Image (spheres, rainbow, N blue to C red):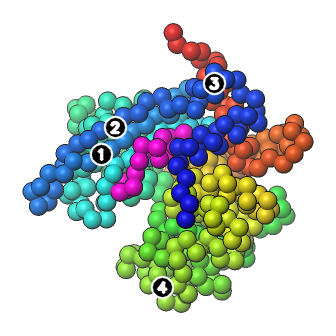
């Protein structure tokens, strides 16, 4: 399987959109470069008494529209280029949905699945200390990402607060509700995907009921997507996790799949389905395909075998530029990551606001505000798509439209603020 450097991929997407909108050279240089990049190497005492030095990153891409916002991932294959790309995508994502954040991302090179809770806590607290010169509720607000969760956010919040001498819940989002987290944060990414998918189907005179859905990845985003889409009437025909996938054209019992995953650690132990490979889920016959794992999953090597009508990117950067072109030529409609999975950062914004005001919302308000923002963002992107197609007299894909919309908003903020000094 061909692998594409994620930073080169993000920059390629940026320059394609910049060409489409005629962005001036100075802003091209500013917006194609990350503002700050911090690499840290720090020791952690392990359970056996040994000391291991880990490498971590925190990258801020752009702050023109507000404080930096972006998740932290723990994985053995984290690289600086991956974190740079994710930070850039976060900038565009926040701009697409119109929330006042810039983009950031963080990561630690580790294998959390082979670390004890004590080791993970020690790693998290030391990493927080190392990046504390960048983060803060008015500067840079981390959140969960791959292999991190509300407990990890609680450790970050507590560590940062201990340094300051008082509790500062607004330094992170995705925390447990008991210490300032927001209702609705856990399923926010998937719920946002649901709303924009429903809008895309409505534009085609269709409903979600009866649509066949395949989901790659069964972490937070994938699991909640399976649950929410099934509740909305879709038929989930395939899901996968890192150990493999399952496929049943008649549909899976989603609640049973969730139970099997929770009790065995993998979806492949679900019995009433055919076992397939993790990437094979991308190629099963379906109406809607939801890549919800990591970047670089749909590439030029497998894009021609994708058999969905709509691809909804719950993951960041799952489709390479070469694959984009292949899918577009096949008539497959892509709801790009900077739109489709922006529900997570949107509810993170709600959480941040609630923390700053110490005034918390109920689920009705959270979901209502999220639905309004996501459906509005979908139509903003589609309107931009129509405008660009009229201007250029040719097809423009939704990813380019979303990126142009986001870049316009960040570029305008940059122009208004000016270049210091």
- x and y, in percent, of residue 311 in the image: 68, 62
Marks 4 and 1: in contact by CB < 8 Å?
Answer: no
Badge 2 density bin: few <14, some 14–19, many ≥20, Cα 10 Å: some
Distance from the alpha carbon under mark 3 to that under mark 4: 51 Å
Q: Earlier in the sequence, mark 2 or mark 3?
A: 3
Question: Which residue is disc 2 drawn over?
Answer: 39
- Quarter of the image with the N terminus is bottom right
Q: In which image quadrant can residue 419 be found?
A: top right
Judged from the image, the secondary structure of the residue bearing numbered disc 4 is: loop
Quick one: 309 or 19, which is closer to the camera? 19
Magenta span: 72-89
Residue at left 45%, top 70%?
242
Question: Which residue is disc 1 drawn over?
Answer: 55
Distance from the alpha carbon under mark 4 to that under mark 2: 41 Å
Q: Is residue 185 magenta?
A: no
Judged from the image, the secondary structure of the residue bearing numbered disc 3 is: helix
Question: Which residue is disc 4 drawn over?
Answer: 270
The label number, if any, that marks residue 27 in the structure image: 3
Whether residue 405 is visible, yes or no, is no
Distance from the alpha carbon under mark 2 to that under mark 3: 26 Å
Badge 3 density bin: few <14, some 14–19, many ≥20, Cα 10 Å: some
């Amino acid at each position: 399987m061909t692998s594409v450097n994620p930073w080169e991929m993000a920059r390629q997407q940026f320059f394609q959109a910049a060409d489409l909108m005629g962005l001036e050279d100075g802003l091209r240089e500013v917006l194609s470069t990350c503002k700050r990049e911090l690499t840290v190497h720090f020791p952690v005492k392990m359970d056996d008494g040994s000391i291991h030095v880990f490498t971590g990153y925190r990258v801020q891409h752009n702050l023109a529209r507000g404080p930096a916002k972006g998740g932290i991932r723990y994985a053995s294959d984290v690289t600086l280029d991956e974190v740079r790309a994710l930070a850039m995508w976060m900038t565009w994502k926040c701009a697409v949905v119109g929330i006042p954040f810039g983009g950031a991302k963080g990561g630690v090179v580790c294998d959390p699945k082979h670390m004890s809770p004590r080791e993970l806590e020690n790693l998290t607290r030391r990493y927080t200390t190392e990046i504390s010169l960048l983060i803060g509720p008015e500067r840079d607000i981390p959140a969960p990402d791959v292999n991190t969760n509300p407990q990890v956010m609680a450790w970050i919040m507590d560590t940062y607060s201990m340094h300051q001498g008082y509790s500062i819940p607004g330094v992170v989002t995705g925390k447990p509700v008991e210490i300032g987290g927001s209702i609705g944060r856990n399923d926010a990414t998937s719920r946002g995907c649901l709303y924009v998918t429903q809008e895309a189907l409505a534009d085609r005179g269709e409903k979600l009921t009866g649509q066949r859905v395949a989901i790659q990845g069964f972490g937070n985003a994938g699991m909640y997507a399976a649950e929410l889409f099934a509740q909305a009437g879709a038929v989930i025909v395939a899901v996968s996790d890192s150990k493999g996938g399952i496929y049943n054209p008649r549909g899976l019992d989603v609640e049973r799949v969730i139970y099997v995953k929770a009790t065995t650690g993998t979806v492949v132990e679900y019995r009433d389905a055919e076992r397939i490979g993790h990437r094979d889920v991308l190629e099963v016959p379906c109406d809607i395909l939801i890549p919800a794992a990591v970047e670089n999953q749909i590439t030029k090597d497998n894009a021609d075998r994708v058999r969905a009508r709509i691809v909804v990117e719950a993951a960041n950067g799952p489709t390479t530029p070469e694959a984009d072109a292949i899918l577009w030529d096949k008539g497959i409609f892509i709801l790009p990551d900077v739109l489709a999975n922006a529900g997570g950062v949107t509810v993170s914004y709600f959480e941040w606001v609630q923390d700053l005001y110490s005034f918390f919302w109920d689920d009705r308000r959270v979901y209502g505000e999220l639905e309004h923002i996501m459906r509005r963002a979908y139509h903003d992107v589609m309107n931009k798509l129509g405008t660009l197609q009229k201007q250029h007299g040719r097809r423009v894909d939704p990813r380019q439209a979303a990126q142009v919309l986001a870049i316009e908003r960040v570029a305008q903020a940059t122009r208004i603020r000016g270049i210091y000094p």
